[in-house]
Image (cartoon, grey):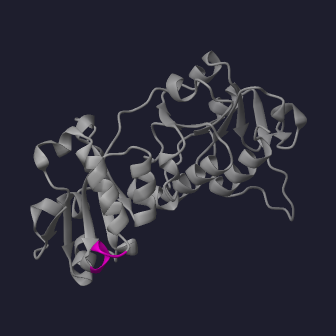
Amino acid sequence: MEIIRIESLQDPRVQMFTTLTEAQLRNRLEPQKGIFIAESPKVIAVALQAGYQPIAMLCEERHIEGDARDVITMAEDARRKTAEGDGGEAFPVYTGSRELLAQLTGYTLTRGVLCAMRRPEERRVEEVCSKARRVVVIHGVVDTTNIGAILRSAAALGIDAVLLTRDSCDPLNRRAVRVSMGSVFLVPWAWIDNLNQLKTLRFRTAAMALSDDSISLDNPVLKQEERLAIILGTEGDGLPQHTIAGADYVVRIPMAYGVDSLNVAAASAVAFWELRVE
């Protein structure tokens, strides 16, 4: 471990934590150089245990031998096992006062630590769905909190894989990762470009939407499906009409008190639980 004290807000070594946008971190032009930021010791530990590769940490001084000590050790071990750690390079831990780091990042750090990590290679739909029986398709959901909450529910309630359309929020967005409590590192996920891939993979599709021909979520026919893809739409407009029309089932959650719908994250948890494989 190499502890590097930061005194200036303009120090280029911490640019990845401070001034790069999510798009710049993702680096679509050179995906192999893309990174993401994980926040808090618990979330960082989940990522490291899942095999994600650390690049550097930004940590309050008081946490280096405190809350962050274990994850720093884990990160050092992970770095030594990769090419990035060859040649005896020490794992860099940038630090400074709490006040300075709050200025650098724009907010007080959660539990005092951030970790920059290497983005993994994109996985193929066929790969993450090869043995799946229940998958969720996140269609055009852009709110980072909702993405994180859906991923957390997916991992907790037995969804085998998560697929996202390209107009959805990146699951490795800093806030989405934090809200998911690291669940994004546990459940396999991939981008999907054409929903017809689901039929090729022998999935029946259930579009969560309100329509005249929708069936109730507790309809027994849904749980009887061997391979089922649950399609969730955007926070405001829901699913596109052509997606609803192309689904095998249109599914609604029964409501009371005249409420017409739930937030997409809440609806996902209800659907995942009801349609789980027992």
Q: Residue at x 22, y 81 (%)?
A: 97
In the displayed structure, does residue 167 sit left or right of residue 162?
left
Residue 249 lies in quadrant: top right
Q: Give the camera-side residue of 206 and 48.
A: 48
Assess whether residue 167 is covered by the magenta stretch. no
Q: Give the camera-side residue of 173 and 253.
A: 173
Q: Position of residue 66 (x, y in %)?
A: 34, 76
Q: Position of residue 225 (x, y in %)?
A: 79, 27
Q: Residue at x 53, y 29 (%)?
A: 128
Residue 235: tell me if it is visible: no
What is the span of residues highlighted in magenta in the rendered image?
62-66
Residue 104: tell me if it is visible: yes
Q: Residue at x 51, y 25 (%)?
A: 127
Quarter holding the N terminus is bottom left
* Position above or below: 176 against 257: above
Q: Position of residue 14 (x, y in %)?
A: 17, 62
